[in-house]
Amino acid sequence: MPTKSDKPSLTIPNPPLDTPAVKDRELCYSYEIGRGEMGVLSFEPYKSLILPYWAFRTVPIAQNSADVLWAIFQSYVERGDFVGADMTRKFIQMGMTRARRYANHKGGKKYDSDGKVLKKWSGDDVAGKREEKEEASELFKGFWRRCIADEDYVALKKEWQKEKKATQSKSDD
């Protein structure tokens, strides 16, 4: 029986993922950039489109996922879909933060059932699991930095913010 580590390689979607926010201006401007990865698991339909390509269990799986997510990010930027690009950036960022949490906290849980912060790993590194999650986190971090430094993405973000503000101003009148 296959295990989760036997997960098949992810491939770049062909045809590219849909661009719902380009087709629906109301959806486009209902999006909130937020802080960090805020809203990544709740803003539909992008969550459902991108989530299947996000994984970080092992370094090879994280590498494959980050490569595919980067291609999805670039595709959204090229097609002028800021919402899709930003959501993909959030998934990449979430790969970095979740892998880091697993590196810092055995089992990936930061809080117990009472909401108290659990202790971090001690010196033991069971079969290199902590080190592997740290490596996966750093891998995603490199892609996240590429996203936020991408000039076309930055320009798309500025234009989207300007248009959203203008749209909100019109609705306030």
Image: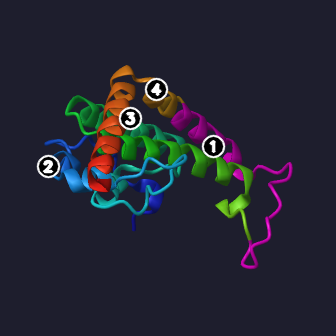
What's the colour scheme? rainbow
- Find the distance from the CA under tag 1 to the CA under tag 3: 18 Å
- Residues under numbered marks 1 and 4 in contact, where contact means CB atoms less than 8 Å apart: no
- Find the distance from the CA under tag 4 to the CA under tag 3: 12 Å
Residue 151 lies, with reference to residue 166, above or below; the image says above
Task: Give the mark, 1 or 4, whose residue is nearer the N terminus.
Answer: 1
139 magenta-colored: yes
| Left or right: 107, with 35 as reference point | right
Provide the residue designation for mark 2. 23
Q: Nearer the viewer, residue 161 or 76?
A: 161
Looking at the rendered image, the disc whose residue lies closer to the viewer, 4 or 2, is 2
Task: Give the mark, 1 or 2, whose residue is nearer the N terminus.
Answer: 2
Q: Please tell me whether mark 2 sits on a helix, a strand or a loop.
A: helix
Provide the residue designation for mark 4. 146
The magenta stretch is 112-141
Looking at the rendered image, the disc whose residue lies closer to the viewer, 1 or 3, is 3
- Which residue is at the far bottom? 114
Provide the residue designation for mark 3. 67
| Neighbour tally class for label 2: few under 14, some 14-19, many 20 plus, Cα within 10 Å | few
- Find the distance from the CA under tag 1 to the CA under tag 2: 41 Å
- Residues under numbered marks 1 and 2 in contact, where contact means CB atoms less than 8 Å apart: no
Task: Give the mark, 2 or 3, whose residue is nearer the N terminus.
Answer: 2
Looking at the rendered image, the disc whose residue lies closer to the viewer, 2 or 3, is 2
Disc number placed over residue 132 in the picture, else none: 1
Q: Nearer the viewer, residue 102 or 153?
A: 153
Residue 91 lies, with reference to residue 66, above or below; the image says below
